[in-house]
């Protein structure tokens, strides 16, 4: 958890950064399958709901933030920044916070960073818009 994440993201947006969130589709069979694996009260769809709620609030303050749903998430979270990526590969039935997170840096045009970035871009391109008008979830 990062304190004041919305404030940080607003400042980044004001400075011209592109801020995009691709989250799992809470209604997807992939999400339901992961929930069956994890078997915890705070389900994947509930965690997605909390994230979307915060994104809707951020979008109300900074309409340039973008959001999409994907039903192609497969036990991995990828966070891409300018020349860095954080990659959490979820292990077995563990939750994300119990799985290793790798810090990958851009070192060339075809290294790990480029591959994870391409993965994120591919999923983004096939994602479904989270909202259709400013500040509201679709």
Image (cartoon, rainbow, N blue to C red):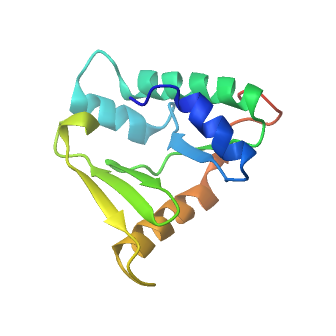
Residue 12 in the image: above or below residue 1: below
Q: Residue at x 37, y 68 (%)?
A: 105
Residue at (67% x, 23% y) in the render: 57
Q: Nearer the viewer, residue 84 or 28?
A: 84
Q: Quadrant of the N terminus?
A: top left
* Above or below, 101 relative to 9: below
Q: Residue furthest right?
A: 133
Q: Is residue 37 left or right of residue 18?
A: left
The percent position of residue 113, horizontal first and vertical second, equals 40, 70
| Location of residue 33 in the rendering, given as x and y in whole percent from the top left corner | 33, 36
- The percent coordinates of residue 135 (x first, y second) are 77, 27
Q: Look at 59% across and 30% down and name the residue there.
A: 6
Relative to 34, 108 lies left or right: right
Quadrant including the C terminus:
top right
Q: Is residue 118 visible?
A: yes
Residue at 45%, 84% in the rendered image: 109
């Amino acid at each position: 958890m990062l304190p004041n994440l919305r404030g940080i993201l607003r400042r980044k947006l004001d400075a011209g950064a592109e801020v995009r969130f691709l989250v799992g589709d809470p209604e997807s069979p992939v999400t339901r399958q992961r929930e069956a694996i994890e078997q915890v009260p705070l389900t994947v769809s509930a965690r997605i709901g909390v994230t979307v709620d915060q994104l809707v609030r951020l979008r109300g303050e900074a309409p340039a933030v973008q959001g999409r749903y994907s039903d192609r998430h497969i036990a991995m979270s990828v966070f891409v920044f300018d020349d860095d990526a954080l990659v959490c590969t979820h292990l077995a039935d563990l939750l994300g916070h119990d799985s290793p997170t790798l810090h990958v840096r851009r070192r060339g045009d075809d290294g790990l960073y480029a591959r994870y970035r391409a993965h994120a871009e591919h999923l983004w391109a096939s994602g479904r818009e989270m909202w259709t008008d400013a500040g509201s979830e679709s």
